[in-house]
Image (cartoon, coloured by chain):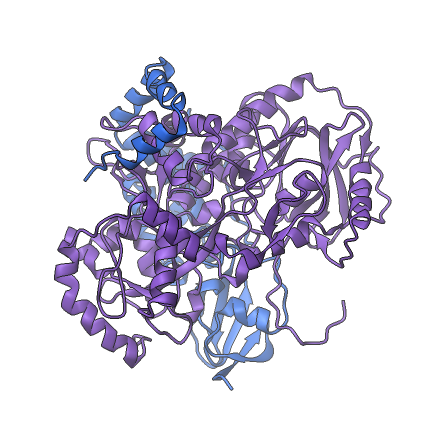
Amino acid sequence: MSLPYTSEMMESIKKVEANRKANVELEPVRMTADEKTALLEAFHPDYNLDSFEEIKVGPNKGQKAPKELVEILQGHSRILNEEIDLSNPDYDVDVLVIGGGGAGSSAAIEANEAGANVMIVTKLRIGDANTMMAEGGIQAADKENDSPAQHYLDVMGGGHYANIPELVEKLVCDGPSAINWLDKLGVLFDKDEDGRMVTTHGGGTSRKRMHAAADYSGAEIMRVLRDEVFNRGIPVVDFTAAIEIIKDTDGKAAGAVLMNMETKEILVARAKTVVIATGGAGRMHYQGFPTSNHYGATADGLVLAYRAGAPLLYQDTLQYHPTGVAFPAQIYGALVTEKVRSMGAKFVNVDGEVFMHPLETRDVAASGIIREVKERGNGVHTPQADGIWLDTPMIDMIHGKGTLEKRLPGMLRMYLRCGIDMREVPIVIYPTLHYQNGGIKISANGMSEIENLYVAGEAVGGIHGRNRLMGNSLLDIIVFGRNAGQQAGAKCKEVELKELTLSHVEAFDKELAAAGIETEVVSPKLLPDYRPEGVKRLN
Amino acid sequence: MADMVTVYLYGKKYEVPASLTIMEAFEYSGYQLVRGVGCRNGFCGACATIYRIKGEVELHGCLSCSTQVQDNMCVATLPFFPLEKKVYDITEIKPTEQIMMQLYPEIYACVGCNACTKACTQELNVMQYIAYAQRGEYEKCAELSFDCVMCGVCSSRCPAGISHPQVALLARRLTGKYIRPEAEHLTKRVKEIEDGECKALIEAIMAKPLEEIKELYNTREIEK
């Protein structure tokens, strides 16, 4: 396959190559706090006010959220006019885990460990989740020069001090034991011959505490967790989406209404405690951005919880990963792991100049790239989208030939499939919608403001404040996934369920009407629709 | 008009833009996918696909999310394949040769046809990692199979009925848990935290006013 770059791109590459040696040696200055603030306000998509809207009903009434999110939060239930018999549930369990990614699987394993009868429902397959796609690594302060306190500082600063301190404390203090748990389950972390973890920097880290399994870190973790779920005989009901939370007459969470994604059959699951672990929202394509996310990332958990009355937190902040693929079309929006920069590749503009430090926090890096392309006009023009160079050949230049292949096999493969050998030529990147910083508000015990409704993973808001650091999401799904499972697994033993009800669903719809909201939208969305528009189809 | 190619999706003929992946070709043709779609990025193995270019002999395995369409491509998806996963307790098994014999004895019936390797969507040397598993060389099996996405195309082509991805996963877990040396710094830190030795430092920071925390952050030393 021949290199698919245009002649214009090849001209620019000549400049990149001419400067490469000097650029490798260059240590770009980091921005000051004031410079970062100014940059974010001018260029970060979260500050693009036109793309946000006020929420008109529910616990976060009066606050802002992305328009696309407001639309589904204020959508109609899928079961609004359905008679659903809650007295004969199809499933009756102690703990119901909604979602089969890293957080849901960790929760299920711990609930099982606590002796609870736990079941996972997931709208696709177990493991079909953003966890599987987390490439770069997982943070934890386990080296001699590091400490949970140092990690705490990095998380708070990276999150612009909006993080909930108790949640961050838990994240960083439980970090090493989370790594240890995975290590003991047999996750194949990168270690040297003495067993020391190979750790690197991520954007915004002050210590090298990024543990990895090549660039398949999340995939390796997910494969092992899934295997462990099966070994423990935990039932997994796949291709089955939760479409509404069920409560009991005391207003506590008591199960979920489910829908078989293929047959559309409606089912009822009764549970003493419920864990929402439904993940992120990249497939909502906020502001028209492409996404690095899994096909099922449609913010379902936020809709379910919100309709049941649980407040959200920081629903107006999203993470745009600085290095999404801008070219070629086949992998547009896909993630280029931050580890590429951890290993020394720098951002270079069309003229071959390094224009910022490669390891600023993600929001700052993304904004810096947007400025370089949109305002300064120094972007690299491609047939798909404009972006800037990420000079990947620097990696082997710094660490020796063969390093990129060994440490970034997934990235190399992804690009080779498109005829691009990233060891030889730089790649074009631009920010891609990557992570839902906000989500459902929880306390340190993992519970939302609805009694017995726990939340873990990307569906949670508050841990990362207004910007998450690389490697803290894999950490968060393990720490808070386990925590939710332990808590829900213990709490279920003292729960006495009252009669089940869906009255909150009807009540929410009445609120919509009272607020004058007229909409055709039904939610949760469950899956995106990429079929061409303008084609006549019968349903 | 973009360059178009002819593809046969489950045998039915469609014209689609040449730049699309197979997965996008399905969507362009009007399918809203539920099966056979996952991360859309080559990591999850949900979109295992088998195709043949019409008129050619060779069958190809691929992931539809990361494979571009070609003219006259005749496509069948493999959204599910019945792999056999044996249940075990990771804390009780040990990395001995016997464990493979107990759990996955069919690997010893490998006829060496190499169809698994030819079909692998990740271009792994599947037959070789199975050979390592047969010999109890689990670390080698783990390394060679590391990029496996467990799509199951290898197993669909295996005359011996081997569930290669499950064998490899067992080898990797054995390697991670038992064969690779312990990370002593990790064990030590976990104990320090359990003993409450890390608490004072973090609580001291948490108790500070925001301005002081900001100052600490902005002036913190960054490891080279």
Q: Decide: is A337 above or below A422.
A: above
Total marks shown come to 0
Q: Residue at x 57, y 23 (%)?
A: A487
Q: Colour of chain B?
A: blue
Q: Colour of chain A?
A: purple
Answer with left or right where residue A263 lies relative to residue B213. right
Q: Residue furthest top?
A: B195
Q: Pick the residue in front: B29 or B205.
A: B205
Answer with left or right where residue A375 lies relative to residue A239. left
Answer with left or right where residue A539 lies relative to residue B17. right
Q: Position of residue A333 (x, y in %)?
A: 44, 61
Q: Residue at x 58, y 34 (%)?
A: A441
Q: Is residue A136 visible?
A: yes
Q: Position of residue A7 (x, y in %)?
A: 28, 81
Q: Position of residue A249 (x, y in %)?
A: 81, 27
Answer with left or right where residue A465 lies relative to residue B10. left
Q: Pick the residue in front: A185 or A520.
A: A520
**Residue A273 sits in which quadrant?**
top right
Q: Pick the residue in front: B77 or A482.
A: A482
Q: Position of residue A401 (x, y in %)?
A: 16, 56
Q: Is residue B110 visible?
A: no
